[in-house]
Amino acid sequence: MRFAIVGIRWTTALLLIAIGTVAAVDDSARAANWLGFRNDSRSVADSGGLPSTWNVETGENIAWQVDLPGRGVSSPIVVDGRVVVTSSSGPRHDRLHVSAYDASTGEPLWHRQFWATGRTLVHPTSAVAANTPVSDGESVFAFYSSNDLIALSLDGDVKWMRSLIENYPLAGNDIGMSSSPVVAGDVVVVQSEAHAESFVAAFNKSDGAAAWQIDRPRAPNWCSPIALTAQINGQSIPAVVIQGADGFSVRRADDGQALWSQGVSCATIASAVFDEQLFLPANGIQQVSYDAADDTVETLWQESRLQPGSASPLIAGGAAYVINGGGVLSCCPVGSDKIAWRKRLGGSFWATPVIAGDRLLAINQDGKATLVAIGAGDDPAPGSVVGEFEFGEPVLASPAVADGALYVRSYQRLWKIAE
């Protein structure tokens, strides 16, 4: 099965906005689901906690594990009782897979396969299935390093497919792309940036029709867009944050027009976080806000010592948590100029940590998981390691948390961990 080709249209209207606020999501739905890369950009579970111990060799607290049909570093997502993952296989990694498993039992629910239409060359540590899929609770949108975009129902029925290389045949690079799609309002937004050609594009969720597309600087960029809600003339408007080395912009989801932007240089792997305010991996971590009265972007707080490596930062409980390129986890209260604590975890980290309750879980590239206490009090003290576990194989995908269970994928395996 080959992909349909997408057409592009352009829009040029300009708008004024007020300060952005995050879209409200039902708490029960948040607890039961994990709908995309870092869920809603925060990588924080809204209820429940993390398992306190497990062992993949003995099976302790391993609810189930499955072998996946191909290779991938994309994260699992959890939606309506289904765990969905993407993979790729074949000598050229041009066979694309989307698989769904019963969240309770691990039993396969459905498995769909497609041919890639774009470039499938990637770095040996990565995969064509590097981009985490996203769901709006009704559909699943799978994006690949080959610049192929697929929409499926929760039961695996193909709704539409798009090959994005028709408009940008040089899109992609030889070490692969990993930016994950995001759902904002009625569109799904993808970001693909490399030396030869770069773009951000949005497609209608219902039928895949092109909504808008913008050219981007021709430079490698692996960070992911995030969704938020902007207040425009008293109305709540879905918007997306586009981040790159040249700065960031907040754009309307319906037509792509810039609402506000700033030319501060941002990270090109670690992605932004929205938790009541926008936090950017830029010169460390910056908290920014938009003042509509004089059309300016205000930096509310900045800490240059919080330099994220490949893992994205976390904001939770009024504090920022960052793993740097040396494997050191730092915690700093938002607004403070003092680092509260640091802990050397060791190893290289591609996976963004997760937080649930008073615990943070970080998994390094070698598959070593470290559980860290982050709650208030002295027992255990914040920053204390309360558990270390080995998966026994590399883990580059960010984990997911839903209903108190932890979902972790390696290159070709998926685990559910629950007490």
Image (tube, helix red, strand yellow):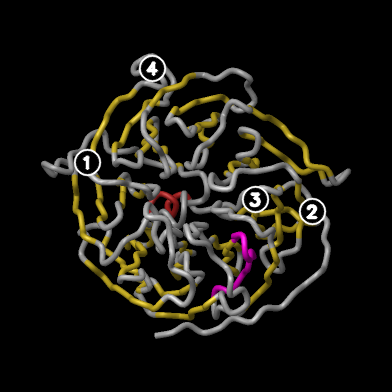
Q: Amino acid at mark 4?
A: Ala
Determine if the magenta segment contains residue 197.
yes
Name the residue that disc number 1 marks.
Answer: 419
Name the residue that disc number 2 marks.
Answer: 17
The CA distance from mark 4 to mark 3 is 37 Å
Q: Nearer the viewer, mark 3 or mark 2?
A: 3
Q: Nearer the viewer, mark 3 or mark 1?
A: 3
Dot 2, how many residues are within 10 Å of its Cα: few (below 14), some (14-19), or many (20+)? many
The quarter of the rendered structure image containing the C terminus is: top left
Name the residue that disc number 4 marks.
Answer: 381
At 50% from the left edge and 25% from the top edge, which residue is drawn? 331
The CA distance from mark 3 to mark 2 is 22 Å
- Is residue 279 left or right of 143 when viewed as pictured? right
At 35% from the left edge and 74% from the top edge, which residue is drawn? 95
**Residue 106 position in % (x across, y down):** 22, 60
Q: Which residues are magenta?
A: 193-205
Say whether disc 3 or disc 2 marks the residue closer to the N-terminus: 2
- Is residue 358 left or right of 324 when viewed as pictured? left
- Is residue 275 left or right of 134 when viewed as pictured? right
Q: Are dots 3 and 1 in contact, CB under 8 Å?
A: no
Secondary structure at numbered mark 1: loop
In which quarter of the view is residue 360 placed?
A: top left
Q: Which mark is residue 244?
A: 3
**Residue 357 position in % (x across, y down):** 39, 34
Q: Amino acid at mark 3?
A: Gly
